[in-house]
Image: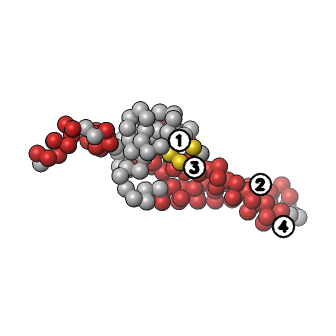
């Protein structure tokens, strides 16, 4: 997989599109993805239970990165008298709001990362579409 394809998949994920084909309408609502991509048929959970546990880790990295960056900016701007109470309570509120905001991005980014390391095959897409030719091919083996 080339770096161009990898960056395209990550960009599609960051713009809430299907990392595989770029289709736009993949969210059922802000907190739920559709079961399958409306264009390519990719099953967004790739037939695995608890598939999105990795998305929680992506969300954690995103939010910790934003918190660390914000913390550093506030410290630099307000030094030598940082507003510790504001940092403590404001940081907690911003983290909670940020988790809600980052939630769908963490899912699409996790899907892109998974597709980079485990690319989708035409056989896998055939399973999702109920492709009889693929199933009969499997039965012959
Ligand atoms: Zn797709």
Q: Where is residue 23 in the image (x, y as percent from the top left)?
A: 47, 33
- Provide residue 123's location: percent of width, then percent of height: 26, 41
Question: Is 56 in front, or is 130?
Answer: 130
- Quarter of the rendering containing residue 85: bottom right
Q: Which residue is pictured at 43% across the width and 35% down the height?
A: 38
Q: Earlier in the sequence, mark 2 or mark 4?
A: 2
Which comes sooner in the sequence, label 2 or label 3? Answer: 3
Dot 3 crowding, Cα within 10 Å, few <14, some 14–19, many 20+? few
* In this rendering, position of residue 81 left or right of residue 89: right
For disc 4, the marked residue is: 85
Q: Does the residue labelled 4 lie within 8 Å of ligand 1?
A: no
Q: In this view, does 80 lie to the left or right of 21?
A: right
- Name the residue tied to disc 2: 73
Camera-side mark, 1 or 2: 1
Q: Return the mark for residue 31.
A: 3
x then y, percent, for residue 33: 50, 45
Residue 57 location (% of width, % of height):
53, 59
Q: Does the residue labelled 2 lie within 8 Å of ligand 1?
A: no
Q: Foreground mark, 4 or 3?
A: 3
Residue 47 as seen in the image, left or right of residue 88: left
Secondary structure type for disc 1: strand
Q: Which of marks 1 and 4 is in front?
A: 1
């Amino acid at each position: 997989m080339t770096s161009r394809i990898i960056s395209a998949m990550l960009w599609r994920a960051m713009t809430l599109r299907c990392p595989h084909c770029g289709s736009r309408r993949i969210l059922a609502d802000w907190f739920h993805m559709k079961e399958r991509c409306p264009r390519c048929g990719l099953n967004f959970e790739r037939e695995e239970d608890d598939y999105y546990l990795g998305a929680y880790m992506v969300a954690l990295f995103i939010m910790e990165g934003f918190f660390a960056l914000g913390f550093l900016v506030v410290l630099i701007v307000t030094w030598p008298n940082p507003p510790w109470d504001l940092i403590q309570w404001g940081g907690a509120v911003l983290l909670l709001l940020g988790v809600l905001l980052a939630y769908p991005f963490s899912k699409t980014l996790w899907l892109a990362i998974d597709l980079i390391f485990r690319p989708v095959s035409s056989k896998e897409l055939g399973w999702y579409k109920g492709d009889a030719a693929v199933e009969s091919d499997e039965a012959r083996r």
